[in-house]
Amino acid sequence: MKTIRDIFIIGWMSFYPPFKSSPLSQLVIVGFFGIVPIIFVLVLGGGGDKLYHTIAGASVSILGFMAIGTMLQDIYNDRYIKLREMMVAMPINPMSYAYGVALSSLFFSFPGVLLFLSYLLFTGKISLFSLPAVLSAILLCWLSLSAIGFTIATYMTRATPMTIGATSNLLGIVFVFLPPVYYPKEMLGSLSFLGLLLPTSNAASIIRGFAGLGPMDLQSLLLHWSILILSSIIFIFLSYKKSKWRED
């Protein structure tokens, strides 16, 4: 119980001050990762399933990009408000701190995720029966990318703000915008196997499978689930083993 309590306290401490200072950040997040891509698709004449592909991808990309952004939040906490330094001096497990920081990204992005999932529910693309599975896929993706972001952040404490921002944006492009998140992996043709490599593309493919957006047999669905679960376990294990909590 103490571990869970610590995670929620750290998550709230990491989320509430920046949210209080800029509450409109929620609208910016939803607009950038959801509304802008949707408008882009509509302008190019995309409708029907193309629109739903974009909405399904938006529900993953919002959380995925914010999860990677935990590296920025962690470095900010460590460098400017000394939150990590305070936590080191307290009887708190390092992974409690890591998941607390990750939880702050969930607080920031989950309203947008719920908005796009609600639209898929309202239009009948996904059902209440499949909603728990869809949420599980998104949360597994969040766990994976949060672990990656936290591990990288612990090795960038001496990096300049420009380097930190560039690294975060680059990872966001690699994990969110380049892989088949906003579009189906079938568009890659012979390279469609690339959609199996990253947590974001696997989560998006699972959502499309439940939404009936393109072909998705049981074998393919199980493959996406297996890789998503395995990648979550691997990245969490690596964050536990490789991340630095105290200075060597």
Image (cartoon, grey):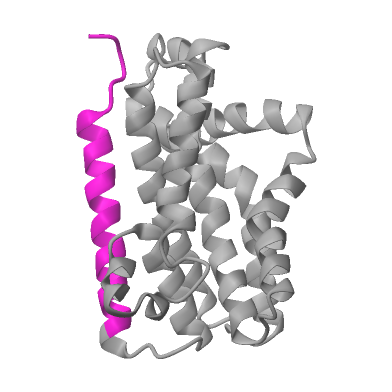
Pick whichever, 106 or 50, lies toward us. Answer: 50
Give the percent coordinates (x, y) of residue 71. 45, 31
Query: At 52% across and 61% down in the image, what residue appears?
Result: 60
Pick whichever, 30 or 87, lies toward us. Answer: 30
Q: For residue 4, which quarter of the picture?
A: top left
Quadrant location of the C terminus in the rendered image? top left
Q: Is 209 positioned to the left or the right of 126 in the image?
A: left
Query: At 76% across and 48% down in the image, what residue appears?
Result: 27
Give the percent coordinates (x, y) of residue 78. 48, 15
Query: At 25% across and 76% down in the image, what residue appears?
Result: 223
As displayed, is residue 219 above or below residue 19? Answer: below
Magenta residues, start to end? 220-248
Query: At 41% across and 52% down in the image, what residue appears?
Result: 175
The answer to whether residue 223 is magenta is yes
Q: Is 226 positioned to the left or the right of 81 in the image?
A: left
Give the percent coordinates (x, y) of residue 22. 77, 32
